[in-house]
Amino acid sequence: MPLIPLLARLSGAAVLARLCFTLSGALVCFVPGAFAQTALTLDLDNLNPLQANRGLAPLSDHWAGVDQQQIALSWQLANYYASSRTTEEMSWVDGETHRLDLVWQYGLAEHWQLGIKLPLFKHGAGFLDRFIFNFHETTSLPQAGRKSAQNDRYLVAYENPQGELFYRDRPHTGIGDLRADLTRRDATASGWRYLGLSLELPTGDGDKLTGNEAVDVSLGSLFTANTRLAGQNLDYWLGGGLSLHLDAKSHIGASPVPVSFSGRAGLSLPLPHHWDLRAQTDIASPTYNSGAKITGFTQWQLHLAGVYHVSKQQRWSLGLSEDLLSKSSPDITFHLRIEIDTGLTGDR
């Protein structure tokens, strides 16, 4: 498990690394000898600092079971460089963001589950710029302005049509918005149906880009199923939902939208030696009423991950995400999730 402390030291986020290392070790010690269902969805976020801090619909199949708990630790590292200008607006993002999520879920009854998620953010300059530049050069991918950009710099800026400027060039670390989910699960002919209601509270700081200082209420529905393709088992999932942003404020100066829509679809292929290969795409409507791509365009990302079943109680997920629509999402995001079951649940 030295990967997390090593990466964090290189990026100046040693506090996050030590926390991740300590908590994951504590979780392993806490686990008894039973296990829960293996979830399929990759619960990831768009870490564009100008669009990330709002609650979206709960589209997850992570499930603990009756009177049982599931605990997870999720870490994401995003690198972004983009600028966007219209005749009235200007926006700019350059830097890296770490997001560490502490997740707890508890089975209230056969069909009902309560979940709580607390994120921790670190926005700063990072260290991946040179690596991404060289990778783009090697693969002939577009640099999107990186050739003339300063490496390992943190700058987030937005200027609205009234000429008001939001400008941040110093690192920020802080707690994000606390989220609570209530989920119902029912069996279908080929899998499961999930209906989730979430409430996200303004515990973050909008000025530091760790929260939106609004109450977000979201409703989402997700379907999972299993089929056989060319003699191979294949799991897939599809979901969507909407979010209401009550009394949403804008610290950057753009006008926030009151309603957001989001969707998710994915596939999971079992591999030998306790591995699964997963691919998922997430899409979400814009955060702001803005003509600039970074702040006002649809967000669309592709996630790829390998899931290793360490034991019946513990799973590790490691992968990366790419933007399918440029500028509204980070160029690349790396993610790691450690999931621990603390009790026996039903079949899947």
Image (cartoon, rainbow, N blue to C red):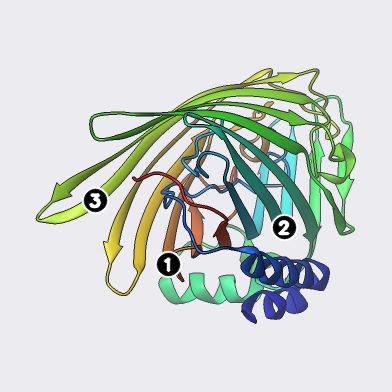
The 10 Å Cα crowd at callout 2, few under 14, some 14 to 19, many 20 or more, is: many
Q: Nearer the viewer, mark 2 or mark 1?
A: 1
Q: In the rendered structure, which disc, 2 or 1, sits on the residue that comes first in sequence?
A: 2
Q: Nearer the viewer, mark 3 or mark 1?
A: 1
Q: Nearer the viewer, mark 2 or mark 3?
A: 3
The one nearer the camera, 183 or 36, is 36
Mark 3: secondary structure? strand
Residue 253 as seen in the image, left or right of residue 86: right
Q: Which residue is mark 3?
A: 234
The one nearer the camera, 54 or 126, is 54
Residue at 81% across / 18% down in the picture? 247
Where in the figure is residue 268, as x and y percent of width and height?
A: 32, 53
How far apart are the alpha carbons under marks 3 and 1? 17 Å
Asked if disc 2 and disc 3 are in contact, CB closer than 8 Å, the reply is no
- Check disc 3 and give the amino acid type: Leu
Which quarter of the rendered picture does the C terminus lie within? top left
Mark 2: secondary structure? strand
How far apart are the alpha carbons under marks 2 and 3? 33 Å
How far apart are the alpha carbons under marks 2 and 1? 28 Å
Q: Which residue is mark 1?
A: 309
Q: Which residue is mark 2?
A: 97
Work out whether 313 lies above or below 163: below
Q: In the rendered structure, which disc, 2 or 3, sits on the residue that comes first in sequence?
A: 2
The 10 Å Cα crowd at callout 1, few under 14, some 14 to 19, many 20 or more, is: some
Asked if disc 3 and disc 1 are in contact, CB closer than 8 Å, the reply is no
Mark 1: secondary structure? strand
The 10 Å Cα crowd at callout 3, few under 14, some 14 to 19, many 20 or more, is: some
Determine if residue 25 is in view: yes
Where in the figure is residue 318, as x and y percent of width and height?
A: 50, 66
Residue 8 as seen in the image, left or right of residue 229: right
